[in-house]
Amino acid sequence: MRAMTLTFGRRLYDLPYPLLVMAALFWGGNAVASRIAVGQVSPMSLTTLRWTITIAVLLVVARDQLRADWPVLRSHWRYLVAMGAIGLTAFNALMYIAAYTTSGVNLTIIQGAIPVFVLIGAFLTYRTRISRAQGVGVVVTIAGIVIIASKGDLGTVLGLKFASGDLLMLVACACYAAYTVALKRRPAVSGLGLFTILAIIAGLIAIPLYAAEFAAGRTYWPTPTGWAVIFYVGFFPSLLSQVFYMRGIELIGPGPAGIFVNLVPVFGSALSVMILGEPFGWYQATALILVLGGIAWAQRK
């Protein structure tokens, strides 16, 4: 039985499409987990403990790779600290805080803004040309984000009265987009070695945030449900999704693999409805169509 399991695991590791679908599924589940965590574990406790679990696993499975990459990584420590703080700690901490004032459906659909922010960030940073098709895709995607943030209410748009959680999630998406754009300048090391050191940095940066939360009296001990959420986000979206996504890129390239990220809003919305019992209104359906349609239009070539 053990031999059969290992053989299946090796075969699965060579199949890019199932790996990429599972990566998107686990990432979609991260938003659902953040909603379940409300009242079960405080945001900074969740942020700190999730990285503790991820780091513990990585130090076992990737320690040799980290040791080999260390001389190069050490010379880029400023870059690595910024990347870990913005792309990993800030993104997840903001999402967990946003979950207190918005729905899981909104959290996942708004994540569709990340590819748009990446296009804009690449243009501002590297002057990467934005084609007409990409420009149209950006506009359509932004329209979807405005609809989801305003709940389809024109008065909300004109009055700029958006839910704080939706706005926080937009800031989180901008952070992750900045992280993605900056990956172009990553050190010449293995993906696993880079992710391991970034996870360690993210965990270290989360500690003072946890201390500030504790000092403010907002920290509380996780409930059994809270611990279940911690182990889920620490093992599945934080670790397996990253490994599966890196392997998918290795097998079929970054362009085709990147398209699978568009499944995150789809999976996240479906899981929010099925697990959390959240409503899925007309404005959310419209926003999802616009977000995915805009991304597809921008990436169709």
Image (tube, grey):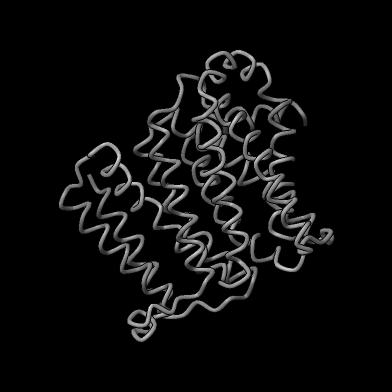
Q: Is residue 291 left or right of residue 129?
A: right
| Residue at far bottom of view | 155
Percent of width and height locating residue 189: 50, 19
In the figure, residue 205 lies in which quadrant? Answer: top right
Q: Where is residue 6 in the image (x, y as percent from the top left)?
A: 69, 28
Work out which residue is located at the far left of the displayed protein and give it.
132
At x 74%, y 47%, the residue is 49
- Tell me how many marks there are: 0
Q: With respect to residue 156, does 116 lie above or below?
A: above
Give residue 180's position: percent from left, percent from top.
42, 40
* Residue displayed at 35% across by 60% down: 292
Q: Residue at x 58, y 33 (%)?
A: 198
- Residue at image point 70% right, 34% down: 55
| Front residue of this view, candidates 175 and 34 | 175
Q: Nearer the viewer, residue 208 or 198?
A: 208
In screen coordinates, is 259 left or right of 278?
left
Q: In this view, does 168 lie above or below 14?
A: below
Q: Measured from the top left, where is residue 289 in percent x and y?
A: 35, 67
Which quadrant: the C terminus?
top left
Q: Which part of the image, by quadrant, shows the N terminus?
A: top right
Does residue 283 sit above or below 294 in this rendering?
below
Above or below — where is 191 with respect to 122?
Answer: above
Taking depth in this image into account, of 23 and 130 the one nearest to the observer is 130
In-front residue for pair 32/123:
123
